[in-house]
Image (cartoon, coloured by chain):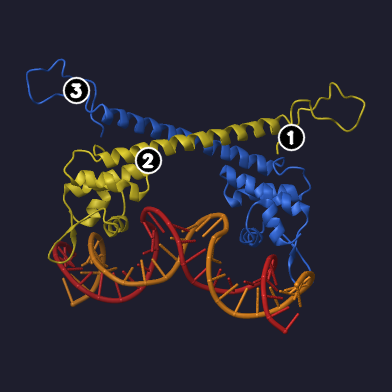
Chain colours: A blue, B yellow, C orange, D red
Amino acid sequence: MRIGELAERAGTSTRALRYYESQGLLSAQRSANGHRFYDEDALRVVREIRTLQSIGFALEETRPFVECLRAGNETGDVCPDSVAVYRRKLAEVEAYIGRLEGVRGHLRHRLTELVAPAPLCETTVHLTERRQPCHGTPRVG
Amino acid sequence: MRIGELAERAGTSTRALRYYESQGLLSAQRSANGHRFYDEDALRVVREIRTLQSIGFALEETRPFVECLRAGNETGDVCPDSVAVYRRKLAEVEAYIGRLEGVRGHLRHRLTELVAPAPLCETTVHLTERRQPCHGTPRVG
DNA sequence: GATGGACTTAACGTCCACGTCAAGGTGAAG
DNA sequence: CTTCACCTTGACGTGGACGTTAAGTCCATC
């Protein structure tokens, strides 16, 4: 097939495919008129790239998977280098989730604090106009 | 204080401070020789920006907080616009966490599958050289 | 007065994965 | 023949938040 068909079947653009080729991730035969020509294996390569990208892999990180596919394996993730990338990515994702959960907690805390503004100890302080913050609820720094 | 001191006390660079100014987030007095001159409020503004950025806010999203600070509030997050940004950001973060948890599950699944490679039903198939995958463990698409 | 450090503006460079435009070649259909 | 879709290479644009020179000014110190 030619580049347009490959792009369509892989759900991407011809520009992206040429870019992959420039990065050494995709190779093409050339027909007499100079047009690129691809086989079904190329489609699998591009789909592997796209799938990994959608998961959050950088293009460069898909390289081991592509090479694994090219080596004749059924899927791109059965090779040691690919597994290593998987592991690294899993660690990254878990760290990122942890950070985001911290942020989520922070945001939730601030929001509840702002919606129920300044949970002051009015029950204990009736006499002064100037209200005191509750004991044990320090200000956010 | 001058820009170098402000940068150091805020934990950033002079380039960043000039950039904030170009974006209308930070303002400075000028001394006779043309040098920028800042007060303590500027430090609070920059720290507000930096804190929000570290949480994952885009620079533009810090604007309501900065304006809230400038309006004379103790913290930048007590104004309606800031609260709105908080809410939006919380939704974004939660959606992102959800996506990442999906990715984490996918990665974990693939890793365990690759570490215990192809849990084949050898116990049931002894006669053929070509091994069959277990019933109920479909291939990943 | 020379050196050095901090400051000024202007402007180009970085990263990533392409998008987009320009100018032209190729092959089939009408 | 023209038209049209499809292809080619080359090169500049995008976005975000600055980093990094370059060339010059200002002030204090040796």
Q: Which residue is mark 2?
A: B55
Chain of the residue that carries numbered disc 1 in the rendered image: B
- Tell me residue A84's x, y (percent): 63, 40
| x and y, in percent, of residue A48 in the image | 68, 47
What kind of element bears circle 3? loop
- The residues bearing labels 2 and 3 have C-alpha atoms spaced at a distance of 28 Å
Does residue D29 appear left or right of residue A28 in this picture? left
Horizontal side of residue A127 vs B120, given as left or right: left
Taking the spot 29% from the left edge, 55% from the top edge, the residue there is B20
- Identify which residue, A85 or B28, lies in the foreground: B28
Q: Quick check: do tags 1 and 2 share a chain?
A: yes
> Residue B47: in sight, yes or no?
no
Q: Quick one: SS at disc 1?
A: loop
Q: Chain for mark 3? A: A
Answer left or right for A90 relative to B95: right
Question: Which chain is home to disc 2?
Answer: B
Secondary structure of residue under mark 2: helix
Residue under the image location 79 percent in, 47 percent down: A72
**Residue A8 coordinates in the image, percent (x, y):** 67, 55
Q: Is residue B96 above or below residue B6?
A: above
Rendering quarter of residue B121? top right
Q: Which residue is mark 3?
A: A120
Picture quadrant of residue A111: top left
Q: Amino acid at mark 2?
A: Ile
Check chain identity for marks 1 and 3: say if they share one: no
Q: Is residue B123 left or right of residue D30?
A: right
Which label number is shown at residue B29? none
The circle on residue B139 is 1
